Image (cartoon, grey):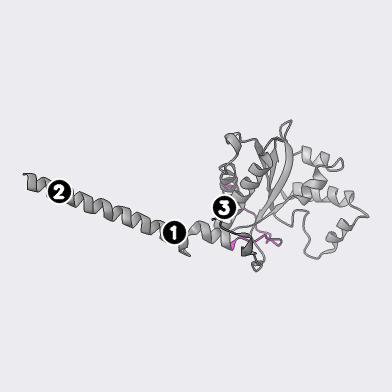
Amino acid sequence: MKTTHYILALCLLVITLSVVGLTRALRNDCCTSEENAVIEAIMARRSIRAYTDESVSRELLDKIAECGINAPNGMNAQQWEVRIVDSKEWLDKATAAYREGVKGTPAEKQFEEPSFKNMFRNAPAVIFVAHKPGHCTQVDCGLMAGNMMLAAQSLGLGSICMMGPLMWLNSDAGKPVIETLGFSEGYEPLLCVGIGYAAEQPDARPRNKEVIKYVE
């Protein structure tokens, strides 16, 4: 009987060690494999400034927004609000107001581009993010935008993060437009993410790996 117990115990030990070894091997493989979906999305993502006219389904936009609000944030306070605009009429009206507001300035030149469609880098859908100003809410919103862009990439969509349009929308001239988004009192629009089907495939721009250093 004791011999049987010893044999069973030995078998369990071997199985346990095998599982641990396999788990470690899989973890190491996930860190280096080109088939790691998350790493692939990060390395493949580009800022897209040209989109097709194809609309993005609300099912996909909902999923992207959900990925956004699952970003890490300080104390899990979630001091952000999200508004999704997929209405061409809204985008065109905002662009018309913007065009009127920047007349006579260098910004007016963008309207001369043959490919110009709207002030949001021509994206057919735009996700606006507002924050309640606090100690780290800007960082929180940046993390949210990162999640949304990676989610878009994984779903076969292009994206671009923008703060430029908000500079005008937050001005006195743009206030009537931004008010239509219905953000709660105390929340300030910070950034927006354009979403759509990419009409371009820009090459990756070089990254300086020398900024990465280990501290011994």
Residue 156 in sight from this viewpoint: no
Per the rendering, the mark at residue 8 is 2
The span from disc 3 to disc 2 (Cα, nearest Å) is 47 Å
SS under mark 3: helix
Kindly indicate the quadrant of the structure image that contains residue 129: top right
Tell me: residue 14, above or below residue 130: below
Residue 21 located left or right of residue 72 = left
Tell me: residue 112, above or below residue 125: below
The span from disc 1 to disc 2 (Cα, nearest Å) is 33 Å
Which residue is tagged 3?
151
Q: Residue furthest front?
A: 216
Q: Main secondary structure of the magenta part?
A: loop
Marks 3, 2: nearer the viewer: 2
The one of 216 and 18 positioned closer to us in this rendering: 216
Mark toward the start of the polypeptide (1 vs 3): 1
SS under mark 1: helix
The span from disc 1 to disc 3 (Cα, nearest Å) is 19 Å
Q: Where does residue 148 sit, x and y in percent of width and height?
A: 60, 50
What amino acid does circle 3 point to? Ala
Residue 131 located left or right of residue 154 = right
What amino acid does circle 1 point to? Cys
Q: Residues within 10 Å of mark 3 (few under 14, many from 20)?
A: many
Residue 142 in sight from this viewpoint: yes
